[in-house]
Image: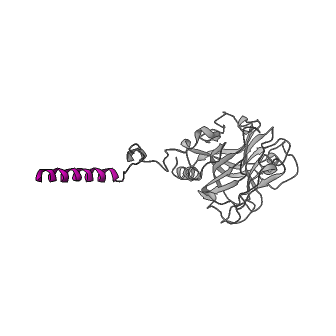
């Protein structure tokens, strides 16, 4: 009888241990592979370089590393003025002194059927000048003042603390724009500022970011006839519009001057970048990556 009782006790002890082991919470319930912390040494937000941010969706890229070419299509500018290379955020940058870069060609990536949603990211050094607005870049329509896309800076202000960012785009009918009504990044002629715009061709949301912070005041621009449309043909201008290029003026509007300031790392994607990747581009750029 004593032997039987010992067997019973042994059986319940083993059962209890087995049950406790089975019910113990796993530290890895999804059986994920081990992570080596050394794999992330030196990375920023998980990346080694800005070049790793959605490379499959990067449709146009100007590094300005001793070249004014658009690197995805290897397109050279047709005409330039007032441009030199200086030290940039990452490698070299282009400095414009009442200058511009003009590309008299239709980029395939900017055709109507190719460009629906987009992200435009660049670093800029610029100050308000008290008299003229600056067209940071324009997806221009030959013979027409307003482009398919106008990346406008309200540098006609005299403020040293507020930089107005006022991009607009052509829609199926009319046009749409946005503005940073209350928030401004730190900026100046010797200060690198990261400005990024996103447009969602499904929802009509047009968002603006500066130095990793969302600053746009009027993001919902509507759908239907309010959606962006990339009319053809187009050309591409950095630092101005047609009216600042000798022999190309389309009217007498003199509100814009050829750009005085610097640009670096101009990237255009054919998708909306997620918020985390927008902040990663900013953080990587700050680190020269």
Q: Position of residue 149 (x, y in %)?
A: 76, 48
Q: Position of residue 28 (x, y in %)?
A: 39, 48
Position of 160 relative to 226 (above/below): below
Color theme of the render: one colour
Between residue 174 and residue 104, name the one nearer to us. 174
| Left or right side of 273 for 181 | right
| Left or right side of 168 for 252 | right
Q: How many marks?
A: 0
Q: Position of residue 220 (x, y in %)?
A: 73, 57
Residue 4 colored magenta? yes
Between residue 281 and residue 228, name the one nearer to us. 228
Q: Position of residue 90 (x, y in %)?
A: 55, 46
Dominant secondary-structure state across the stretch colored magenta: helix
Between residue 120 and residue 124, name the one nearer to us. 120
Q: Which residues are magenta?
A: 1-26
Residue drawn at x 75%, y 46% as measured from the top left? 138
Quarter residue 105 falls in: top right
Residue drawn at x 74%, y 63% as measured from the top left? 157
């Amino acid at each position: 009888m004593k032997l039987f009782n010992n067997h019973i006790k042994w059986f319940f002890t083993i059962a209890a241990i087995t049950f406790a082991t089975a019910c113990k919470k796993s530290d890895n319930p999804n059986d994920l592979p081990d992570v080596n912390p050394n794999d992330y040494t030196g990375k920023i937000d998980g990346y080694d370089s800005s070049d790793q941010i959605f490379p499959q969706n990067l449709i146009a890229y100007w590094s300005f590393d001793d070249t004014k070419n658009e690197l995805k299509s290897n397109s050279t500018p047709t005409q330039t003025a007032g441009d030199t290379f200086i030290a940039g955020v990452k490698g070299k940058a282009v400095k414009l002194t009442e200058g511009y870069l003009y590309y008299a060609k239709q980029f395939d990536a900017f055709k109507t059927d190719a460009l629906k949603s987009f992200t435009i990211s660049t670093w800029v050094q610029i100050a308000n000048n008290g008299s003229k607005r600056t067209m940071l870049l324009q997806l221009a329509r030959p013979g027409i003042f307003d482009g398919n896309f106008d990346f406008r800076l309200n540098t006609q202000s005299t403020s040293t603390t507020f930089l107005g960012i006022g991009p607009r785009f052509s829609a199926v009918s009319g046009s749409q724009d946005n503005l940073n009504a209350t928030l401004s990044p730190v900026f100046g002629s010797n200060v690198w500022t990261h400005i990024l715009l996103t447009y969602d061709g499904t929802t009509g949301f047009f968002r603006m970011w500066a130095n990793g912070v969302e600053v746009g005041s009027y993001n919902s621009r509507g759908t239907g006839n309010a959606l962006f449309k990339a009319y053809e043909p187009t050309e591409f201008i950095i630092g101005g519009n047609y009216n600042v290029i000798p022999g190309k003026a389309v009217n007498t509007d003199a509100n814009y001057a050829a750009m005085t300031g610097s640009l670096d790392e101009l990237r255009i994607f054919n998708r909306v970048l997620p918020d985390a990747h927008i902040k990663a581009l900013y953080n990587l750029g700050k680190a020269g990556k």
